[in-house]
Amino acid sequence: MSKIAVNMEDDMYKWRSRIIILIITVLFLSGCGYNTIQRNEEAVFKAWGDLESQLQRRADLIPNLVAVVKGYAAHEKETLEAVIEARARATSVQLSAESLSDPEAVAKFQAAQGALSSTLARLMVVVERYPDLKANQNFLDLQHQLEGTENRISVARQRYNKAVENFNFSIRRFPNSLTNSMMLHLERKEYFKADESAKEVPKVEF
């Protein structure tokens, strides 16, 4: 057998080996959860973006709401300032998608949003003292938008938590867990919990 023929045979053997390795790799990746894990992480990022959007929508409504309330209840200075300060803190605490695996960062973000929810709840109770304000069309429109936004925040939070649940399970189940530990090194995401204090109706003395 000539040297050229031997070299051609060696080349063909190398190509066949490479093709076989490529096929095995594709089959391994398709069955080990590599794509599933990344798809689930993208779902978490999308759900987080939707939740962030609704939280920002709420923050955008607050200045106009405070302005309308102030026109009828300027002497409720403490409550109005608390809302403004809580909004400032909530908008200053940013949480990137990459930080969703950081319990401390998520807790800080949730605390700021929870404080804003609590001050808004107190403001709505104060409004009950002012029938003229409650009848104001601008206030009614803002109140309606705020209520709708709160509902959307609740839905977005549930969808985000569901996406987190799917992702966290996908990196723990076998054989995905091996794929993640050897190749992706992704960490579990933190859930976004509703602030319990925001559910409590503040006491107001009339």
Image (cartoon, rainbow, N blue to C red):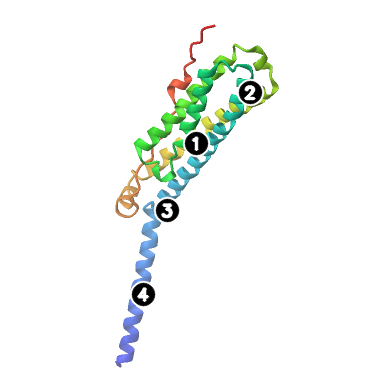
Q: Work out whether 39 lies above or below 158.
A: below
Q: Residue 90 carries which label?
A: none
Which residue is the site of mark 1? Answer: 159
- Name the residue type under label 2: Val
Q: Which of marks 4 and 1 is in front?
A: 1
Would you identify the image quadrant in which residue 73 lies? top right
- Please state if 160 lies on the left or on the right of 104 as rendered: right
Of badges 2 and 3, the one in the foreground is 2
Please name the residue that numbered disc 3 is placed on: 35
The x and y percentages for residue 4 are: 33, 91
Q: Earlier in the sequence, mark 1 or mark 3?
A: 3
Judge left or right: residue 203 versus residue 132. Answer: left
Spatial separation of the CA atoms under disc 1 and disc 2: 33 Å
Between discs 1 and 2, the one toward the N terminus: 2
Instruction: Report the residue at 41% width, 43% height from top.
Output: 167
Q: Which amino acid does label 4 sit on?
A: Arg
